[in-house]
Image: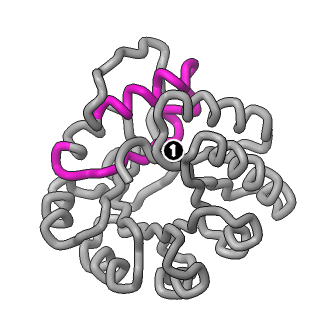
């Protein structure tokens, strides 16, 4: 688990969602999370199934935000658990040992330790920067990654206002994955935008003049 962690926006237009996700996958996405907070159950099933088929073609995992039953129904690769969702332990018990269980840990290292004990696959920290998508009641200090790297054996994901530029110091502090929404989905060239994030993890850095926005 290393690279760009792509999180979907609240788009009802499934064709647009798939086209943009496909373009980003061409640029080097490591993992996709399906997150649509406002979708109906029917739309969520339709989009989730379509995204899963797309991710299968590219050999990338798809995790579902919040909705354990949807993951089980689709046979997706895992679930991301937020602070008000089912517990990590509950989701791990339901999915078994072979699936991904991600945990939002915000700026709380003790929450991350508990998630690791309960079977989380990765710990997500943030928000680190202001975000046009998610409203955080606090800003996470970048140095929590240094502490987490010492305290945890899990991959570390960072989220909140991510651009390739402001994600770089977080990768330097030990982030394994950078979660992005707007920086990719609002870009005129999602493939190039994804490549810019991928470049943080060792690929040759490329410029993308028409990429815009932040997670």
Give, as a single range, the part of the protein colored magenta.
Answer: 172-200
In the rendered structure, the answer to whether residue 40 lies left or right of residue 141 reads right
| Position above or below: 159 against 14 | below
Residue 59 x/y as whole percent: 57, 46
Q: In which quarter of the image is the N terminus?
A: bottom left
For the image, the number of numbered tags is: 1
Q: Name the residue under label 1.
A: 6
Identify the residue at the far top of this view.
209
In the rendered structure, the answer to whether residue 137 lies left or right of residue 143 reads right
The picture quadrant where one finds residue 34 is bottom right
Identify the residue at the far right of this view.
42
The picture quadrant where one finds residue 62 is bottom right
In the rendered structure, the answer to whether residue 87 lies left or right of residue 165 reads right
**Identity of the residue drawn at 17% across and 72% down:** 151
Mark 1, secondary structure of its residue: strand
Q: Nearer the viewer, residue 141 or 24?
A: 24
Q: Does the magenta stretch include residue 192?
A: yes
Q: Nearer the viewer, residue 13 or 132?
A: 13
Residue 168 x/y as whole percent: 24, 37
| Position above or below: 76 against 190 | below
In the rendered structure, the answer to whether residue 120 lies left or right of residue 155 reads right
**Identity of the residue drawn at 62% across and 36% down:** 21
| Position above or below: 2 against 106 | above
CA neighbours of label 1 inside 10 A, class few (<14), some (14 to 19), many (20+):
many
The picture quadrant where one finds residue 15 is top right
**Identity of the residue drawn at 52% across and 36% down:** 182
| Position above or below: 208 against 30 | above
**Identity of the residue drawn at 31% across and 59% down:** 156
Residue 27 x/y as whole percent: 49, 28
Residue 33 x/y as whole percent: 57, 53
Q: Does the magenta stretch include residue 71?
A: no
């Amino acid at each position: 688990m290393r690279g760009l962690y792509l999180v979907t926006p609240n788009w009802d237009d499934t064709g647009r969602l798939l086209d943009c996700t496909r373009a980003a996958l061409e640029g080097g996405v490591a993992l996709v999370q399906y997150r649509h907070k406002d979708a109906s159950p029917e739309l969520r099933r339709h989009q989730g199934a379509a995204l899963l088929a797309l991710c299968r073609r590219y050999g990338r995992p798809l995790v579902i935000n919040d909705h354990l039953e949807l993951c089980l129904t689709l046979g997706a690769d895992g679930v991301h658990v937020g602070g008000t969702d089912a517990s990590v332990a509950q989701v791990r018990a339901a999915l078994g040992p072979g699936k991904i269980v991600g945990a939002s840990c915000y700026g709380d290292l003790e929450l991350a330790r508990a998630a690791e004990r309960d079977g989380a696959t990765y710990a997500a920290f943030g928000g680190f920067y202001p975000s046009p998508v998610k409203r955080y009641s606090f800003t996470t200090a970048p140095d929590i990654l240094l502490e987490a790297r010492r305290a945890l054996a899990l991959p570390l994901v960072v989220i909140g206002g991510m651009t390739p530029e402001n994600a770089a110091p977080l990768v330097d502090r030990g982030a394994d994955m950078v979660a992005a929404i707007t920086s990719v989905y609002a870009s005129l060239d999602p493939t190039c935008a994804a490549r810019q994030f991928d470049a943080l993890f060792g690929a040759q850095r490329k410029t993308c003049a028409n990429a815009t926005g932040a997670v």
